[in-house]
Image (tube, rainbow, N blue to C red):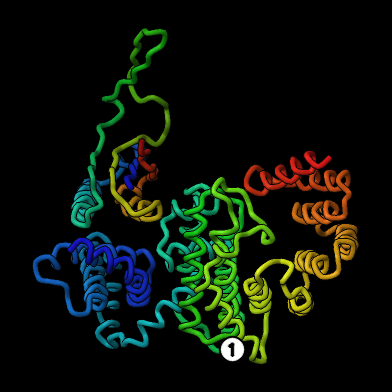
Amino acid sequence: MQEVTSNIYRMESRRILATLIRLLGNFELAEEALHDAFVAAAEQWPRDGVPVYPRAWLISTGRFKAIDKLRRRARFDASLTQLALQIELDGAEKPSDREEIKDDRLRLIFTCCHPLLTPDMQLALTLREVCGLKTEEIARAFLTSAPTVAQRIVRAKAKIREACVPYEIPALCDLRDRLEIVLHVIYLIFNEGYSFTSDSVSERQNLCDEAIRLGCLLIELVPDPEAAGLLALMLLQGSRRDANRSPDKQIILLHDQDRSRWHMEDIVEGTKLVNKVMAGNAVGFYTLQAAIAAVHAQARSTTETNWNRIVALYDLLLLADPSPVIELNRAVAIAMRDGPNAGLSLIDALLNRGELHNYHLAHATRADLLRRLDKPAEAQQAYQQALHLTVAGPDQRFIQGKLAELKVLF
Amino acid sequence: MEYLCLVYFAEKKLADQSDQEKTTLGRESKAYDEQLAASGHLVMAHALESPSNAITVRVRNSKVSTTDGPFAETKEILGGFILIKAGDLNEAIRIGAGIPLAKLGSVEVRPIHNW
């Protein structure tokens, strides 16, 4: 029975919370109600059996527990009597239908990613309220302290309350802008999990899984090409999770990865999604990145990769979102297509513009091209520059490894 | 996870309350403890006697010395504590914020270290 309850908690608690927030109009009250509903379930279900519709049972129990609690607190704070009555009347007037309950999760996502909140707040609040991660887990994944994350969450909720942010799906005229923030939050969550700043494999994977889960939820609820593009991107990048690091946590570059360790089911699903969006008439930032990832995913090796298509996709990406980091990646693709010299002159021009001067990967990429051009002394110097710009961790170990290799070659 | 909610307040503030206010605060505190027990959050809750009944012990070079009163002179004194079980730090903060005496002072929420 305990297993049944905890399974239902895992599967349903976020949906129930989303509905309770709408019914009770308050995050804290809803969290308490969710907790109390599961305490009641643990007491009653072993005796009376699991209800036919456990989710509906938990929602209505949570709501009644909240009303009851407000009434009891009203003995000390009379203003709560009115609130309890209001919640009771609201719920009685319009019982939630299935469609509305389904939309509650979307309401919750849009509320957690409200433009009034800072990006830090949006991230923390989404991970805790929508994904159900604990404050301490979020802190570990983002290499921050738990009190810092906790305060972001407290402040975010206070802001939502004080500004009376409505609990709703934005109107069609605002939907595009608001959806962009949501996609960006999901993208940041995934990137944090996918990047190599943290050594803890499980924490990183946890973030990637949550981001993909959010992406699936989003395309189920809003049909949007960029939402589909983002999900495709995450599936395709995520497919390399077991190949891009050695057992001793060293970075393995695309070129050296054992491609049999790539997850085929993710590649198939991601490619299918991206092809569908690319066939349409609106192609954006996430879709183009996914299309590039799909080209890599289909190749058997870096030499058999269609670099021509990748360069063309980077050209489109630069149109959609001009940024020096994308230019750097395009230079790598050019180097693969036209030889290291062609890539090197692009990177040198980029560095001369000054924007990427403090970006360690620009120097590391330059070093790699110099190494391929048989210029070990210059390569060494560039790796040293890259090393100065990293902090202790996988990236730094990777560059140190490359430097050691060069010394062997000397 | 377990968290210790340390309740601090200025003694004078409590002393300045009317008898009726004190009774209400007492009933409210008892009701809150009962509520936390019912929801499975409560491990233990205690009020502390006034620091005027406290002794501070120091050991220096194996010598024990004692002084009256609390360890440090502060306006706000530790008046009581509630040890709770909570899902995460934010749930602990929510529970800490509900402690009725928080209205008179402050509540420090400290995670219990697991060895």
Q: Is residue A293 left or right of residue A113?
A: right
Q: Disc 1 marks which residue?
A: A173
**Residue type pointed to by label 1:** Cys
Q: Chain of mark 1?
A: A
Q: Quadrant of residue A228?
A: bottom right
Q: Quadrant of residue B17?
A: top left
- Measuring from the top left, give residue A93's x and y in whole percent: 27, 87
- Measuring from the top left, give residue A317's x and y in whole percent: 74, 76
Identify which residue is drawn at 61% across, 85% down.
A275
Identify which residue is drawn at 77% across, 48% down.
A386
Identify which residue is drawn at 39% across, 42% down.
B110
Q: Nearer the viewer, residue B84 or A259?
A: A259
Work out whether residue A350 can be spotted: yes
Number of other residues with Cα within 10 Å of mark 1, as a class: few under 14, some 14 to 19, many 20 or more: few
- Measuring from the top left, give residue A101's x and y in whole percent: 35, 82
Q: What element does badge 1 sit on?
A: helix
Vertically, is A54 above or below B72?
A: below
Work out whether residue A118 can be spotted: no
Q: Residue furthest left?
A: A47
Identify which residue is drawn at 42% across, 27% down.
B73
Q: Quadrant of the N terminus of chain A?
A: bottom left
Vertically, is A230 above or below A358?
A: below
Q: Is residue A252 left or right of residue A308?
A: left
Q: Nearer the viewer, residue A267 or A15?
A: A267
Q: Nearer the viewer, residue A332 or A181?
A: A332
Q: Quadrant of the C terminus of chain A?
A: top right
Q: Is residue B21 left or right of residue A227?
A: left
- Measuring from the top left, give residue A118's x and y in whole percent: 58, 64
